[in-house]
Image (tube, helix red, strand yellow):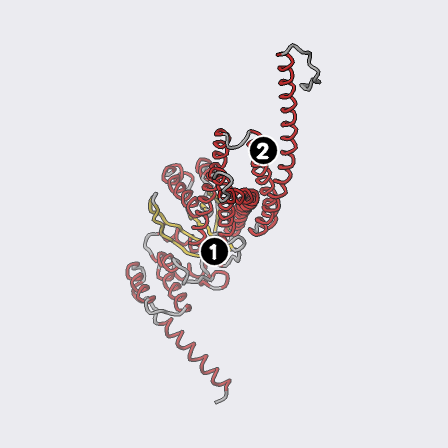
């Protein structure tokens, strides 16, 4: 048998098997009975059907409900072309199955959710991750209608789909604010941007509350081919969501780059002092000065913590969802720990000064140097990371900009601060010498021959 004929026979057999499998998914007399349709669908999925078979099963579910074949063709375009959907994405088939419900309001709401999911799946800027995700948090159980991932930034996000009229929003304001409050907590926990999309307008009270909670609200979002005046398409809403993802990514790149740059500058400045303190402990000619090591070590720990925390915050979007959330939480906690370590170093320096372990001149020099590193390093790191982050939102470039800016800013501030301190110290010494000379000559009744340096 010729190879071309073998290939043709194989294709016909494969097509026949697929057709037989799809044909075996017929719902039959289960039309209009949601419980029976759900049972049939679950049993069918247990047979490990092909992708084509799963799509055909979804089509049959839609036909069996109130939307019928007319709705399948007019609303979902038979799930073909730009309306195609991958049923293997978690939650898609369950949402589609709810279109066979006898509750018309439920069918309407889940139709909108599925249309949004299809739009995300075929948009190119995002990936559809899951639908109808159950969330069990300490502040209560809830669910995420749609979970997506933005391609440009790597960030995950959550969409809540609503169909509340203005009157219903006023009536259910407390309930909706409670839901938004849970979304805000979810954002603080996972770092995922939150989106609240409504078919109708949004009351000023809810819009204001959502903005304060860090939630982007998108109102008057339609899904039809011909939209009324004043209604935005879901594609327009996706563009606004993409812009929010980008702003969040830029902001985190700035913060992370600043932390990395400041941490590198602080660690570089403190490592030499730490090493000197360690050597001093092993020198038998000098008594051990543990407080000096504690001070320098605290600054080193603070710098290291800033670098690690800033890196976690900056590069978290490159990882999968679960790891991304953990790195985001670690970045926040690590940053707080680093600030505490920095404060501990300052407190130890003050204690050493009060106990006489260091002179006032050395104390003020150390304070001026530390302040210069902190102020100049932070400002330089922020400027350096901001310029690169706004331009690209690339965490590596933001970190590089932060490091360069930190060293430049710290150097400038250290030089300026040292010059000012030297001037102040020299003026104080001249004033002290003048006062001492005046007191001596006054004590012995002699006329002062010292020039007046008080002016």
Please provide percent x and percent y for residue 323: 44, 54
What element does badge 1 sit on? loop
Q: Which mark is residue 250?
A: none
Q: Is residue 136 left or right of residue 378?
A: left
Furthest-top residue in this view: 445
Q: Residue at x 58, y 33 (%)?
A: 365
- In the picture shown, does residue 428 fall above or below 273? above
Residue 251: name its quadrant.
top right
Quickly name the residue at label 2: 365
Q: How many marks?
A: 2
Q: Residue at x 32, y 67 (%)?
A: 46
In the picture, measured across the screen, residue 405 lies left or right of residue 32, that is right
Residue 330 rendering spot, x and y as whole percentages:
44, 47
Mark 1, other Cα within 10 Å: few <14 / some 14–19 / many ≥20: few
Q: Secondary structure at mark 2?
A: helix
**What is the spatial separation of the Cα atoms under label 1 and label 2, in whole angstroms?**
44 Å
From the viewer's side, name the closer residue of 272 and 59.
272
**Whole-percent x, y for residue 150 in the image:** 50, 54
The answer to whether residue 383 shows anywhere in this view is yes
The image shows residue 18 at horizontal and vertical percentages of 40, 74
Q: Which mark is residue 319?
A: 1
- Counting residues from the start of the chain, the first of labels 1 and 2 encountered is 1
Query: In front here: 5 or 65?
Result: 5
- Residue 171 higher or lower than 324, as above or below: above
Q: Which of label 1 and label 2 is nearer to you? A: 2
| Location of residue 66 by image quarter | bottom left
| 155 up-or-down from 46: above or below | above
How would you rate the neighbour count of disc 2 (Cα within 10 Å): few for under 14, some for 14-19, many for 20 or more?
A: some
Residue 243 visible within the image? no
């Amino acid at each position: 048998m010729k190879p071309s004929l073998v290939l043709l026979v194989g294709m016909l057999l494969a097509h026949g098997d697929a057709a037989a499998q799809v044909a075996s998914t017929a719902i039959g007399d289960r039309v209009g009975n949601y419980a029976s349709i759900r049972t049939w669908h679950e049993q069918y999925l247990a047979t490990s059907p092909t992708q084509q078979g799963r799509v055909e099963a979804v089509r049959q579910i839609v036909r069996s409900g109130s939307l019928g074949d007319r709705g399948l063709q007019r609303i979902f375009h038979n799930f073909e072309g730009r309306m195609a959907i991958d049923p293997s994405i978690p939650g898609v088939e369950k949402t589609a199955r709810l279109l066979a419900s006898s509750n018309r309001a439920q069918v309407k709401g889940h139709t909108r959710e599925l249309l949004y999911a299809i739009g995300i799946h075929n948009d190119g800027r995002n990936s559809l991750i899951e639908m109808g995700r159950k969330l069990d948090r300490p502040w209560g159980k809830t669910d995420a209608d749609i979970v997506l991932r933005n391609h440009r930034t790597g960030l995950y996000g959550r969409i809540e789909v609503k169909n509340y009229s203005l009157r219903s929003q006023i009536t259910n304001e407390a309930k909706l604010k409670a839901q938004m409050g849970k979304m805000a907590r979810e954002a603080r926990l996972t770092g995922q941007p939150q989106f609240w999309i409504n078919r109708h307008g949004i009351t000023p009270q809810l819009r204001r509350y959502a903005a304060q909670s860090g939630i982007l609200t998108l109102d008057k979002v339609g899904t039809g081919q011909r939209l009324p005046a004043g209604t935005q398409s879901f594609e327009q809403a996706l563009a606004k969501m993409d812009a929010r993802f980008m702003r969040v990514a830029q902001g985190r790149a700035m913060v992370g780059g600043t932390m990395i740059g400041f941490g590198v500058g602080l660690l570089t400045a403190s490592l030499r002092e730490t090493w000197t303190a360690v050597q001093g402990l092993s020198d038998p000619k000098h008594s051990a000065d543990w407080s000096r090591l504690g001070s320098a070590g605290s600054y080193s720990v603070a710098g290291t913590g800033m670098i690690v925390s800033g890196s976690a915050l900056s590069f978290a979007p490159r990882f999968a969802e679960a790891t991304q959330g953990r790195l985001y939480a670690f970045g926040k906690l690590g940053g707080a720990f680093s600030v505490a370590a920095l404060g501990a170093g300052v407190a130890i320096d003050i204690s050493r000064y009060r106990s006489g372990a260091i002179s006032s001149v050395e104390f003020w020099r150390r304070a001026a140097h530390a302040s210069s590193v902190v102020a100049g390093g932070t400002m330089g790191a922020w400027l350096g990371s901001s310029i690169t982050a706004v331009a690209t939102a690339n965490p590596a470039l933001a970190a590089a900009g932060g490091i360069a800016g930190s060293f430049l800013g710290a150097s400038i501030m250290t030089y300026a601060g040292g010059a000012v301190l030297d001037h102040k110290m020299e003026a104080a010494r001249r004033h002290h010498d003048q006062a001492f000379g005046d007191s001596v000559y006054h004590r012995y009744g002699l006329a002062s021959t010292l020039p007046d340096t008080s002016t």
